[in-house]
Each structure stands twice: as C-alpha cells, then as structure tokens.
Image: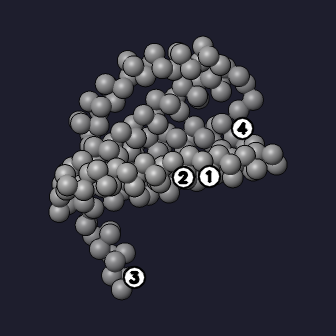
Amino acid sequence: MVLLVLANSALNIYVAPKIGALISRIGERHALTLEYSALIIIFLLYAVVENGNVATVLYILDHIFFSMAIAIKTYFQKIADPADMSATAGISFTINHIAAVVLPAALGFVWIFNHSAVFVIGAAIAVLSLIVAQLIPDAPSDGNEIRRDAFWQGINKEAA
C-alpha cells in the first residue's frame, strides 16, 4: 500500500502541472466534465473489479482524474468577489470536512452489506456533480457565474 501511495504521489507531481495547463486551455466546465465522466466509469469498474492489478490501475486513474477538481477552485476565483474569498473558503472547508467524515461513516455501514454498492453510490454522486458542472459558463467571471443558454432558460420557464 505504501508503494502504491508513493507511486501515485510521484505520478501526480508530474501530472498536476499538466492538468493545470489543461484546465487553462479547455476551461473549467470541460475539465470537470472530463473528471466526473471518468470517475463515473472508474467507480462502476471498482464495483465489479476482482483483480488486484486492475484495482491498482483504477486507484491511480482515480487520483489523477480527481486532481482535476482544482477546476472548482479556479472557477470560484473567477466569479467571486475577492472580499468574500476568506469567508467562502472557510465555509467550503467546513462543508468538505463534514462530507469527509459523514460519507465514509455512512458508506462504511453500506460496505458491511454490499461493498459494490459503495462504488455505485460514488458513481451516482459523480453523476450529480457532472450535471451541476454543466452550469459553468465557457468564460466564468463576476456577473457570468452560470450558463444562461436556451436549455437552462427553458428549465426556468417550466419551474415558474
């Protein structure tokens, strides 16, 4: 396990700058779409994998794609008022911390009954994240926080 973590860390040192450049080139929405789409596939494969070598590859790919989550931070930096950064970062940290405690505890109980279900639930969370990521505009900025194209306007008209 230690060798796996070390290999993963070394690979991420090499890959992380390239992911940053990719996000800069294709934008946050496309990067997060790629990340969540890959994670859906990876989590579903985790649910059925029985080979340790395949699980190792999935683990490394999981961490590589998960590192694309930096796009959430770059998106936030583009849309947020600098005066709100500190307070919002504190709230974000708190929410992430709560999720990091509650989800493993809850899914630990699910694991007792069906370990594959944990990964299917993870894939479902990634599907929800993928849907929400589609709200990010091509050029996010203060005043242009979400996409306002015809699709989203149609949803808003139906809700009204």
Q: Which mark is residue 133?
A: none
In the image, 149: left or right of 60?
A: left
Q: Secondary structure at mark 1?
A: helix
Q: Amino acid at mark 3?
A: Ala
Quadrant, the N terminus:
top right
The quarter of the displayed image where residue 147 is located: bottom left
- In this rendering, does residue 120 appear at all? no
Q: Disc 3 and disc 1: Cα gap in Å?
A: 32 Å
Give me the C-alpha separation between circle 4 and circle 2: 28 Å
Secondary structure beneath label 3: helix
Tell which tag, 1 or 4, sits nearer the viewer. Answer: 1
In this rendering, the label closer to the viewer, 4 or 2: 2
Q: Which residue is mark 2?
A: 98
- Labels 1 & 2 near each other (Cβ < 8 A): yes
Q: Which residue is rendered at x = 41% and y = 58% of the image? A: 132
- Could you tell me the amino acid type at mark 2? Ile
Q: Quadrant of the C terminus?
A: bottom left
What residue is disc 4 on? 48
Residue 141 on image: x %, y %:
18, 54
Q: Hey, which residue is sitting farthest right in the picture?
A: 113
| x 53%, y 33%: residue | 62
Residue beneath disc 3: 159
Q: Is residue 109 left or right of residue 12?
A: right
